[in-house]
Amino acid sequence: TDQNPCTDQQAFGAYTPLQTARSQSDDVLKRLNGWTDEQAKTSLAPLRAKVAVLGAFTYTLLGEGFCAMRLDNEKSIKTQAEVLAIAKSKFDAALALVNEMPDGAAKTELLNLLYVGRAGTLLDLGDKAGAAADAGARCLALVVRAHEVVDEPPQVLGVIVRVEADSEQVR
């Protein structure tokens, strides 16, 4: 049966933890950006990048799972598309932070996670070519989520096993 997350029973038990994680990641990143490496006596680039990438995922999960919401103390209510657009911008900003990290396994893993997350968000926004480009640029063994791009709205199915960049379907 078809499910519509905007009319069916929703898992509101996930809403508060996701909003808490989103708010905390935004706050922690703001605080980290207020410090220099010299003040912290360590390189903050890896921590900033990790917080930014994981924070972007919270926006994606909120956008996928809930029809409308307020963020922080805003008076306006955001639609799913607006929240997903914010998620994409968060992934884009996180990419700059990840690229500040020194080369190595930690950077590669975070880039994989970022591209997988942004690919899913791009699918949600209807950008199949962008999603295929992001997903195709990464090691698919690390992919933890996928979408069937056939019906609206996109639904989380499982694991991407192959990306066909030149077709209309991402599997």
Image (cartoon, rainbow, N blue to C red):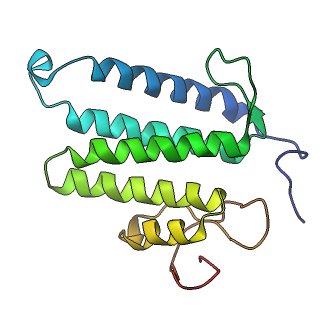
Q: Nearer the viewer, residue 18 or 165?
A: 165
Residue name at image x 35 percent, y 59 percent? 112
Where residue 29 appears, x then y in whole percent? 37, 26
Residue name at image x 49 percent, y 43 percent? 89
Q: In the shown orientation, is residue 169 left or right of residue 144? A: right
Q: Nearer the viewer, residue 94 or 21?
A: 94
Residue name at image x 51 percent, y 78 percent? 163
Q: In the shown orientation, is residue 153 left or right of residue 57? A: right
Where residue 158 appears, x then y in whole percent? 60, 65
* Image quadrant containing the C terminus: bottom right
Q: In the shown orientation, is residue 113 left or right of residue 126? A: left
Numbered marks: total: 0
Image quarter of residue 35:
top left
Q: From the viewer's perspective, is residue 164 above or below residue 119?
A: below
* Image quadrant containing the N terminus: bottom right
Where residue 133 appears, x then y in whole percent? 45, 71
Q: From the viewer's perspective, is residue 63 above or below residue 30?
A: below
Q: From the viewer's perspective, is residue 17 above or below residue 53?
A: above
Where residue 23 appears, x then y in whole percent? 53, 23
Q: In the shown orientation, is residue 8 left or right of residue 18? A: right
Residue name at image x 29 percent, y 23 percent? 33
Image quarter of residue 58:
top right
Q: From the viewer's perspective, is residue 65 above or below residue 76?
A: below
